Amino acid sequence: MADPDFNEKLASLLARCGLGDKNAFATLYDMTKSKLFAVSLRIVRERHVAEEVLQDSFVNIWNNAANYAIAKAAPMTWMSAIVRNRSLDIVRRPRLEIQDEEEFFTLNLEDPSLGPQDQLTQGRDVAQVEVCLKGLEADQRQTISLAFFHGLSHSELSMHLNKPLGTIKTHIRRGLLKLKDCLNDHIEYSPRDGGRV
Amino acid sequence: MKHVTPELRSALAAEYVLGTMRGGARRRFEQFLRSDYELRAEVAKWEADLTPMAERLKPVRPPDHVWANIQARIGGTNLESAARKPAASWFDSVKFWRMLGTGFAALATVLLATLVTLRANVGPANNEPQAPMMLAVLEDQGDPRMVVEQPKSGLLMVKMVKPWKTMSDQSLELWVIPKDGPPRSLGVISQDKDSTIVMADMDLRLLDGNMFALSKEPMGGSPTGTPTGKVVCKGMIAHMPPKPIKKSPAQI
């Protein structure tokens, strides 16, 4: 991940996958499997389900690699979205044993391979979203983080956080709006385009 | 979805990407996505904003059998096997785009069909495998209209995705736009049917080609040698690797 050309490499591998190059696909898999497995595991929570998600997702990535260029997204964003959508499709609920509510600022960020320099090379989004998330009210941030990383639905969030459904929805809606405004305000400081369309 | 306010559309797209939109609502939203370009763009924006957060998760190595299963499902090392199942691939593709949300179902189908042709071309049955040398999907404001493919030296195939209404007083002229320099004409094409373009100096004209564009010109083509009318669709050129893809032990 320390390689500044990480996203360019992935984009070029995806292009080769689109032409049926299975060596490129094997490299793509090796470069992204652990990141993407973590994404799914966090949402579906069961290893065997996450393994299925990863399989389905990579088959889809292979079948649709030729369309990647049209998606106009950063390669990791494109692939993460596939994995997230597949995870959200098949997740079984409820599972409410989650303890670490401010996890995004603790455990979630424990990727030792990512230093400040990598944040730059990965595009503005990761670092900027963090800054903007920190600017939200605690309730909003907690609700959005739980939803995003753990794939909790409105009603699951309501049960888990012991708050009325309406309150949860308000936190999410207002939090997302504030996040969007914050991100829009910071676009000009972007060190590099991280996949914004 | 067209009748809802932009604010609500954005909010729904955000909840779709965040993952709080679930079950029936999620499936209905995905149906809207298939036919609503602007909604897809809204989802893409939110994905660009939110999804990179997922990259900060601590990586977890998946077990090796996952890769073995993926290999098995994409047809082992035999490229031709993928081409033999166009129906299944098409189905997967549509299902996939529904799921992905930022997709273009029609384009996926077109590209897949092209890819199937491509893979058939590089199949082991063919002693002199030939993949297209270049490929482009020409769009009109995100709407795919034509696929331009160079199957071999000196030849271009133009495939209609959505034909134009026949214009009796105007012609459609295809241009290649090089990385540097003015557009070069590739001739007038049919308005409602696939075209094949053969030119002795085709490869020279396509040299350093960056984009194809189609313009409306007076009957018979541009009188000046450069585009004079409105560009009706355009698309970036994907250049293919010069050699056919070969099997290697690493792929097993």
Image (tube, coloured by chain):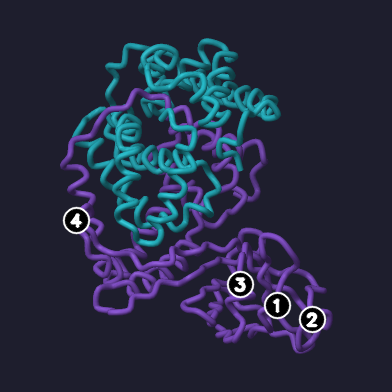
Chain colours: A cyan, B purple
Going from N to C along the chain, the mark reached first, 4 or 3, is 3
Question: Which circle marks residue B249 in the picture?
Answer: 4
In terms of secondary structure, where does tag 2 sit? loop
Q: Earlier in the sequence, mark 2 or mark 1?
A: 1
Residue B234 in the image: state x and y as whole percent. 65, 65
N-terminal of the pair, mark 4 or mark 1, is: 1
Which mark is in front, 4 or 2? 4
The answer as to whether the residues below labels 3 and 1 share one chain is: yes
Residue A34: x %, y % from top left:
30, 32
Question: Residue A27: in sight, yes or no?
Answer: yes
Label 4: element kind: helix
Question: Any mark on residue B206, and which?
Answer: 3
Please state which amino acid type lies under the numbered disc 3. Leu
What's the distance in space between the residues labelled 4 and 3, CA to CA? 35 Å
Q: Which residue is mark 1?
A: B185
Q: Residue at the location (62% across, 50% down)?
A: B38
Mark 4 and mark 2 on one chain: yes
Given residues B19 and A65, the one toward you in this image is A65
